[in-house]
Amino acid sequence: MLGMEQINLDKILTIYGRNSILEALLDNSLKIYRLHLSKSNKITPQLEKIIKLAKKRNIEIVYHTKKALSYISKNSKQDQGVALDIIMKGFLDEEEFIKNHNSYRLLALDGISNPQNLGMIIRSATAGNIDAIILPTKRSAQISPLVIKSSVGTLFKLPIIKTSSLINSLKIFKKSNTDIYTLSSYAKNSYRDEVYSNRVIFILGNETIGVSKEIEKLSDKSISIPMRRGVDSLNVAVTASLLAFL
């Protein structure tokens, strides 16, 4: 059982929902900090299995009122009376990532709002040549059971740089000689024609409005994915897949 003083809270991911938590507890590669349960839960075979697995792995179990648990899960309508704290070794800050990588290709997500898109982006990035994802903590989809399901478990395999300010994070990377590219359907330069340096960030924008103006101004160049037959755009997760295997 891990003491609070040993835990970097910035590396904690709290998930909810009985199916997601059961899958996490069955994955022995994941380091689990604490299981949270509502005192009002009615015992079911699935909940019994969750408790049994937690005890087997010597994971601390804490019981809460239903209201208190909702503060932990941040989703009282869908948490099903359970929440689980996972220690994510892959959660990094900018300085920590740069210190440990001489070269890299990153995806930065600017306002991606659909959890399924986020999950599919993570899956493609993990499978391809992307070294980490920069994920804002505001005005963006956050990691949830739906994201985990859409990523088909790959979320736990890819470094994620969580940031409260995407602009500030990009500025830090720019100081480390990182080239920043904005994906835009209006750009004249094809993503295939660029000669990329050994430090690159590709910025993917919101599903409806694209990359914000302030982020676009910070980028070094806009690039596009050429399309035929009058198609003017691709789903952002499909775009991420093309970049991941560039």
Image: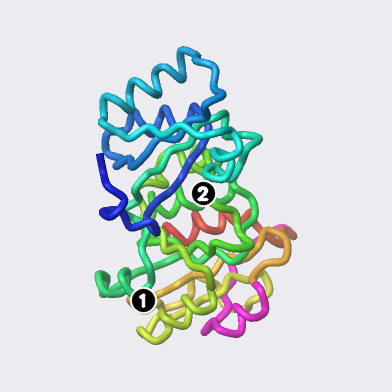
- Residue 120 visible from this viewpoint: no
The reply to whether callout 2 and callout 1 are in contact (CB within 8 Å) is: no
Q: Is residue 150 magenta?
A: no
Q: Which residue is mark 1?
A: 199
**Residue at coordinates 50% horizontally, 14% vertically from top-left?**
44
* Quarter assignment of residue 57: top left
Asked if residue 181 lies left or right of residue 67, the reply is left
Pointer 2 local density, CA inside 10 Å: few below 14, some 14–19, many at least 20:
some
Where disc 2 sits, the SS reads loop
Looking at the rendered structure, the kind of residue marked 1 is Arg
Task: Estimate the spatial distance between the alpha carbons at disc 2 and disc 1, rounded to whole Å.
Answer: 26 Å
Q: Which residue is mark 2?
A: 143
Q: Residue 156: horizontal and vertical position, in percent?
A: 37, 46
Count all numbered tags in the image, as a single digit. 2
**Residue at coordinates 72% horizontally, 66% vertically from top-left?**
209
Asked if residue 158 lies left or right of residue 28, the reply is right
Asked if residue 199 lies left or right of residue 236, the reply is left
In the picture, the quarter occupied by the C terminus is bottom left
Q: Can you tell which of label 2 and label 1 is closer to the viewer? A: 2
Q: In the depicted view, which residue is nearer to us: 76 or 162?
A: 76
| Region of the chain picked out in magenta, as a range | 212-229
Looking at the rendered structure, the kind of residue marked 2 is Ile
